[in-house]
Amino acid sequence: MFDTLSDRLQGALGDLRGKGRLDEEAISKAMREVRLALLEADVNLEVAKSFTATVKDRALGQDVLKSLSPGQQVVKIVHEELTALMGAGDSRLAFGKPPTVILLAGLQGSGKTTAAAKLALLLRKEGKRPALVACDLQRPAAVEQLEQLGRQIQIPVYRLDTKDAVAAARHGLDQARRDGLDVVIVDTAGRLHVDEDLMAELEAVRDATKPLNILLVLDAMTGQEAVNVALAFQERVAFDGVVLTKLDGDARGGAALSVKAVTGRPVKLASVGEKLDQLEYFHPDRMASRILGMGDVLTLIEKAEAAVAEDEQAEMERRMRAGEFTFDDFLASYGMLRRMGPLQGVLKLVPGMGKQLQGLDLDETQLARVEAIVLSMTPQERRLPHLISTQRRRRIAAGSGTSLDEVNKLMAARKQMAKMMKQMGKGKMPAFPGIPPGKAR
């Protein structure tokens, strides 16, 4: 989503990074480019002006101008101000005496019902026992949609056949108490625009359920309009934070960068894909790092930990140290990578990879072809790759619908991987140009 903004900001700051000395003219020129980049990303005008003014004031300070690497100091300031802009500090959900009520509000079409199910799944992974309450009684089939999502993730959905949203909310809360559940997520009605009926119903449901968290669901694809919607809701319902949906789309990022500055309420959660497990807590510092092309190592680690069990991690580490890398290990690694999400998105979390991926079309079907080759092997061949003769390679190629050349390349790649892992296991790294063998990079 932030690709264009990221390119523009990195371009604006690129000239500063390598400079040994900075003057006011160089900083002013860079800040003009930064302001233009923010405005093109649909960031609120006053927010963009305030942001660049703050960065410029800090960049012209004596600590920066006299430092050994003033360009890097300016980038550091931009990172800190981006983080503050999106909501520095703790933005976790609040939990109290069960059941904790989380009320979701938002316009029709913002992805509120799906966000409710995603949030329930996320909380269950954290050890909570959530339930969903259907209070969107205006949109046709909204209740059925929530029930269907609940069945997919095996989380109870409470409904009441009525047109009274307050009665439905009270019924759901009572049911959750009886069933001993500790979190209740209330999916409320939306409208195509903000109106009096919508707000009156929302206030009534809020007063009946006394939620500890009121979350406003905003569609990131609507850009600056999302901020206007947030302001309208803020006047009537003092929400605690924002859930941004469709953050994986091609919107320009203005909502994510403006909503905290304009409303004073942080983005707490972000939907990064269509699947029900693709809802993440929003970390402003990590997002700032991604925008500035610094990668996001912490999120990468969390994704990897979530994708592989502890016993699998220990076994994989043991095998790596021993220099063992069979095709069974390949299948396990491939499965882990798929569970982490789209390959391009995962690679962008690696520091320095963003630029290298520009213009590169990562064809994930190629990985599927490799998987087909491995699955065409017998269990014994996967376990003991040295048994795979030329005759067997021909059979594997025919069975997987690939060529002998592709099979040969995979065999060679596995051998190289095993060799590299053995060296890493001994604390060594393969030789690179200008680096003596056995020395860590």
Image (spheres, grey):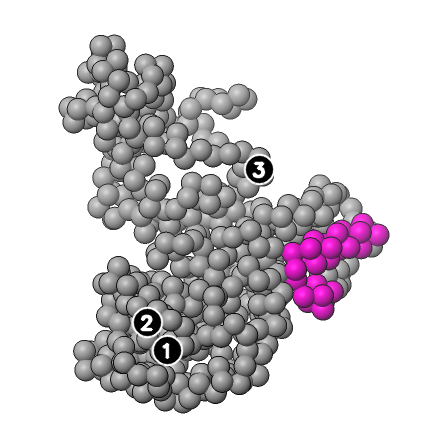
Task: Choose mark 2 or mark 3, whichever is in front.
Answer: 2
Tally of marks: 3
**Percent position of residue 77, x then y:** 66, 57
**Percent position of residue 350, x then y:** 48, 43
Q: Is residue 305 left or right of residue 151?
A: right
Which is more toward the observer, 145 or 440?
Answer: 145
For the magenta stretch, what is the residue range? 25-50
Q: Is residue 71 above or below residue 56?
A: above
In 3D space, how far apart are the residues under numbered discs 2 and 3 (Cα atoms)?
A: 42 Å
Q: Is residue 241 left or right of residue 291?
A: left
Which is more toward the observer, 136 or 50?
Answer: 136
Q: Amino acid at mark 3?
A: Gln
Q: Residues within 10 Å of mark 1 (few under 14, many from 20)?
A: many
Q: Which residue is mark 1?
A: 137
Q: Is residue 362 left or right of residue 225?
A: left
Q: Which residue is mark 2?
A: 143
Q: Considering the numbered disc 1 on the image, is that residue within a helix, a strand or a loop?
A: loop
Q: Is residue 252 visible to the viewer in this orientation of the structure?
A: yes
Q: Which mark is residue 358?
A: 3
Q: Is residue 45 a member of the stretch shown in magenta?
A: yes
Q: Is residue 300 left or right of residue 309?
A: right
Q: Residue at x 42, y 40 (%)?
A: 343
Q: Amino acid at mark 2?
A: Val
**Percent position of residue 268, x then y:** 47, 67
**Percent position of residue 44, x then y:** 67, 66
Q: Amino acid at mark 1?
A: Leu
Q: Is residue 248 a member of the stretch shown in magenta?
A: no
Task: Choose mark 3 or mark 1, whichever is in front.
Answer: 1
Mark 1 or 2 closer to N-term? 1
